[in-house]
Amino acid sequence: MQAGLIVLCLAYVLSQFFRAFLAVLSGPLLRDIGARPEDLATASGLWFLAFALMQLPVGWALDHLGPRRTAAGLLLLGGGGGAALFALATAPVHVSIAMALIGIGCSPVLMASYYIFAREYPPARFATLAALMLGVGSAGNLVASWPTALAAELIGWRGTLAGLAGLSALVAAGIFVAVRDPVHAQGGEKGSLLDLLKLPAIWPILPMMFVNYMPAATIRGLWAGPYLSDVFGLSTTQIGQATLLMGAAMIAGTFAYGPLDGILGSRKWVVVGGNLLGLAALAGLAVMIDDHVWLSVALIAAVGFLGGSFPVIMAHGRSFFPPHLVGRGVTLLNLFGIGGVGVMQFASGRVHERFSGGPEVAAPYVAIFTFFAVTLALGVAIYLFSRDRMD
């Protein structure tokens, strides 16, 4: 089981990479195939929406086929095939199609490991194990920053994506060989998604899942590059270094959140406190949009650190699921978490387009960060009605 989890962690490194690398390649993609920020917002949004829409069939597959075949098959076809298509792209639409395929390929990876945690380990350890997998796997966030910018300069973005296609296929093969399905992966009581939706306790949790990961993922994966380039004139390498710092902050935040529910005896208030601080960081970005580059980078990193409560929210929701619906339960939560990012990628692209073209180059980014802050505030307000629960 441990060997399989290590390979799944490597797959999750790829998943984190693919959701974040477009910000670093925004310059080369604009120059070579005419992909504007709005085009990349669409492509990135399609990654997240494809990923989110796959959560329901992935949940069924985890409960009926097990994590080994589910994760290996989709990563090989979607991840490897999508990266290969990206390497051959000659127009923005090709990038969008490739990103949708890659989103499908990455969709089962984290949930396969969470499914194993829920089936094979004590419930009280779920949040810590989930945070550990998320934190270690988020090394892909770091690789998607300055190292990717360096690779793009040395071998070009096409060569970089071709290498990633081969690596995705290799990791998929490793999953098929090393992952062992939990002994109760099949059979047991019957149930469906409707049974989950009949649980009143999860309804206030779903909006929080929808908005929690959205600011950090959208800024890191899309808007950090255009913002730092347009407002402060940073180069591709400098943007890579700034996003490297944000990626490191996101990893540190995930590890920091992981044990807090056990230490403080609450999941709900850990999530509320962290997201209110994240809201303050977003407000600071909007107000001090062009004061100083290092202040902006520090605030972006703070958004990344404070947005790491995903595994605690996941553990909060999982505590209400019956054992035979764990696969569909965690993927339902993930649908909202990743789907929220996808929706906001599209929405933020429209916000950027609406406020672009005026005399103030920073105006689109003030609007985007304000939009994120308001959305996060609404999610926290609804989550206040949730029922706290520890295992």
Image (tube, grey):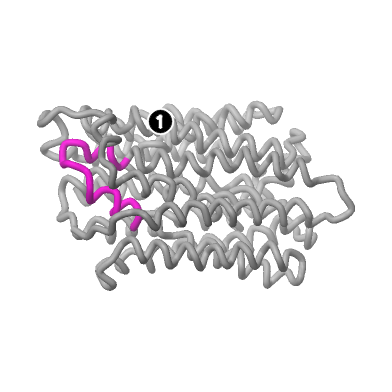
Q: Position of residue 104 (x, y in %)?
A: 44, 31
List the single residue furthest toward the front.
385
Region in magenta: 312-330
Q: Where 294 falls versus 331 (above or below)?
A: below
Left or right? Give the position of 113 relative to 210: left
Left or right? Give the position of 220 relative to 93: left
Q: Is residue 245 visible?
A: no
The residue sitting at 29% across, 54% down in the picture is: 316
Left or right? Give the position of 243 relative to 207: right
Give SS at disc 1.
Answer: loop
Q: Amino acid at mark 1?
A: Met
- Quadrant of the snapshot with the C terminus: bottom left
The residue sitting at 45% across, 29% down in the picture is: 78
Q: Position of residue 222 (x, y in %)?
A: 63, 48
Prevalent SS, magenta region: helix
Q: In this orientation, which residue lies closer to the viewer: 296 or 205?
A: 205
Q: Position of residue 285 (x, y in %)?
A: 66, 64
Q: In this orientation, which residue lies closer to the viewer: 374 or 174?
A: 374
